[in-house]
Image: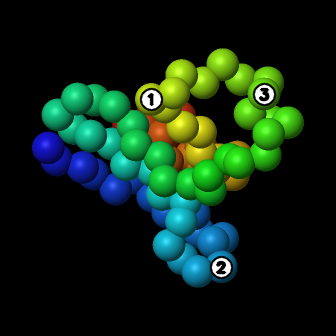
Amino acid sequence: MTLRKLGKDPESPSGGSPTVYLDEETDNYLVQGWKVVDPDRLSQMDIPSHETVVEIPRRMVRFFLEVKGD
């Protein structure tokens, strides 16, 4: 599996998160972000037990290839 780092949040105070990756083998995105634990927000989504939800700021969308046009 080859992961390509597409970008880290340039405004992250620690510089370590969130981060967007592309798995070049599966052509899927992997997103490192803040784990959503707020029950009110989670109750508005239908999340299977084998999945989780992470949050990233809107400014991170620029790292997705379709948006950049690469």
Q: Determine whether, in the image, residue 60 is placed left or right of residue 23.
A: right
Would you name the residue on which mark 1 appears? 50
Q: Amino acid at mark 2?
A: Pro
Q: Residue at the location (34% across, 56% down)?
A: 5
Structural crowding at the residue carrying mark 2, measured as other residues with C-alpha within 10 Å and reported as few (<14), some (14–19) or many (≥20): few
Q: For the view shown, which residue lies furthest in the top direction?
A: 46
Give whichever of 40, 28 is nearer the camera.
40
Q: Amino acid at mark 3?
A: Ser
Q: Which mark is residue 43?
A: 3
Would you name the residue on which mark 2 appears? 13
CA separation in Å, label 3 and label 1: 16 Å
**Where in the figure is residue 62, as x and y percent of width and height?**
56, 46
- The kind of secondary structure element at disc 2 is loop
Q: Amino acid at mark 1?
A: His
- The kind of secondary structure element at disc 3 is loop
Does any portion of residue 66 appear in the rendered image?
Answer: no
Precedes in sequence: disc 1 or disc 2: 2
Q: For the view shown, which residue lies furthest in the front direction?
A: 49
Structural crowding at the residue carrying mark 1, measured as other residues with C-alpha within 10 Å and reported as few (<14), some (14–19) or many (≥20): few
Q: Residue at the location (33% across, 42% down)?
A: 22
Does any portion of residue 56 appear in the rendered image?
Answer: yes
Q: Which mark is residue 21?
A: none
**Where in the figure is residue 47, as x and y percent of width and height?**
60, 24
**Where in the figure is residue 42, as x and y percent of width and height?**
74, 33
- The kind of secondary structure element at disc 1 is loop
Q: Residue at the location (66% across, 19% down)?
A: 46
Q: Quadrant of residue 11?
A: bottom right
